[in-house]
Amino acid sequence: MANGTSGQGGRRAFMTAGVGGGLAVLGSGATASGTTQQDAGPGQSDLPVREHRNKAATLRAFKRQNAGGDIYEILHDDVEWKIVNGRTYVSKAEFLAEGSAPIMDRLATTLVMTISDLWTDGDTVIIRFEGDSTATDGVAYHNEYCWVWEMRGGLVTRCYAFLDMMAVRELVDRIDLG
């Protein structure tokens, strides 16, 4: 697993998805706000601690999922979950019922989430990963994801989810839950 955690000596360049859906590439020494480590303002002094805490919480959530638990325990009740080029859910309950369930209810095995890349920058965590499972009809399900999480207090308060919607549509169309 590659780890571009930005709180360690010399920041690695990484990409983060912006609110408008564009991409911004941050170079060595820059933070998301454009400041450097040397001229970081108030609230930046605890940056490495927050990044470490957010990375650890993220890794625990993925480990829990892969052990047959629920990755979504990490979501704040008032999370805003935006599927890029799709729908936005305004609460954990709404996302679980209407965003996650149509996929998870069609899977016979745990959706194993294998992290390819993980970056942290303050309270932003970017996870690129693959999800693999077997659907209830015995056919393999595979998808590639990139989630951009905004975290507060160890919980995800906002997510921008990038995924292969064609794979989701094929799964949903193929398996009738009725």
Image: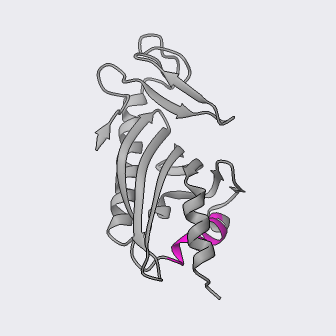
Q: Is residue 82 left or right of residue 143?
A: right
Within the image, what quadrant is residue 48 found in?
A: top left
How many numbered badges does the structure rendering display? 0
Q: Note whether 115 is above or below 122 in the view shown.
A: below
The image position of residue 171, as x and y in percent, is 56, 71
In front of the other: 172 or 157: 172
- Classify 111 as above or below 90: below
Quarter of the rendering containing residue 34: top right
Assess whether residue 101 is covered by the magenta stretch: yes
Name the one closer to the observer, 147 or 43: 147
* Residue sticking out furthest to the top: 39
Q: Quadrant of the C terminus?
A: bottom right
Q: Is residue 75 visible?
A: yes
- Residue 13 vs residue 32: left or right? left
Q: Residue at the far bottom: name it.
A: 178
Is the residue 63 above or below the residue 50 in the image? below
Q: x and y percent of residue 76 in the render?
A: 57, 56
Q: Residue at x 41, y 23 (%)?
A: 13
**Does 113 appear in magenta?**
no
Q: Write the residue at 64% across / 72% down.
A: 97
| Residue in the picture at 63% in, 64% down | 95
Look at the image and name its color scheme: one colour
Which segment is the magenta one? 95-106
Can residue 111 be seen in the rendering of this structure?
A: no
Give the quadrant of the N terminus: top left
Q: Residue at x 36, y 50 (%)?
A: 115
Q: Position of residue 11 (x, y in %)?
A: 36, 22
* SS majority, magenta: helix
Residue 35, given in percent of the width and then of the height, sits at 51, 15
